[in-house]
């Protein structure tokens, strides 16, 4: 499946006006391209990134909403157990 098709079918940070600065925070300083981002992106990972994006933006309700959308309970619990470490500032 191509990145373009995935981009259209998966809600991601790119549907939420992510800034270059926020991308750098989400990727620990690596400015990856949109194509790189979508290359192996699954929906749970996209929701995790949305959670982290809204943590950066200090929008707790939106962050919580996207955290709850993650289907893999083990993956979701990683964020619930270490909320202080969800994003590198």
Image (tube, rainbow, N blue to C red):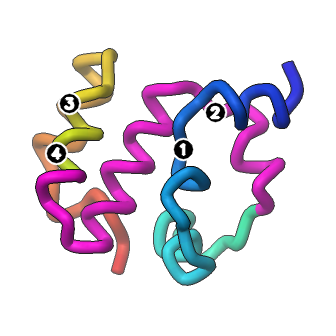
The residue under label 1 is 12
Q: CA distance from mark 4 to mark 2?
A: 20 Å
The residue under label 2 is 41
Task: Find out whether the residues at labels 4 and 3 contact each other: C-beta distance under 8 Å.
Answer: yes
Q: Earlier in the sequence, mark 4 or mark 2?
A: 2
- Quadrant the N terminus occupies: top right
Q: Is residue 84 above or below residue 42?
A: below
| Stretch of the chain drawn in magenta | 33-62
- Give the SS element for disc 3: helix
For discs 1 and 2, the disc positioned in front in the rendered view:
1
Q: Which mark is residue 64?
A: 4
The residue under label 3 is 68
Camera-side residue of 86 and 38: 38
- Would you identify the image quadrant in which residue 89 lies? bottom left
- Give the SS element for disc 1: loop
For discs 2 and 3, the disc positioned in front in the rendered view:
3
Number of labelled discs?
Answer: 4
**Could you say where residue 26 lies in the image, as x and y percent from the top left?**
49, 65
């Amino acid at each position: 499946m191509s990145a373009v098709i995935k981009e259209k079918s998966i809600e991601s940070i790119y549907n939420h006006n992510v800034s270059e600065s926020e991308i750098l925070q989400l990727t620990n300083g690596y400015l990856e391209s949109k194509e790189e981002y979508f290359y192996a992106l699954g929906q749970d990972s996209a929701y995790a990134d949305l959670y982290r994006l809204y943590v950066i933006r200090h929008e707790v309700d939106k962050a919580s909403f996207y955290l709850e959308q993650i289907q893999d309970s083990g993956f979701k619990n990683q964020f619930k157990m270490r909320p202080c470490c969800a994003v590198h500032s």
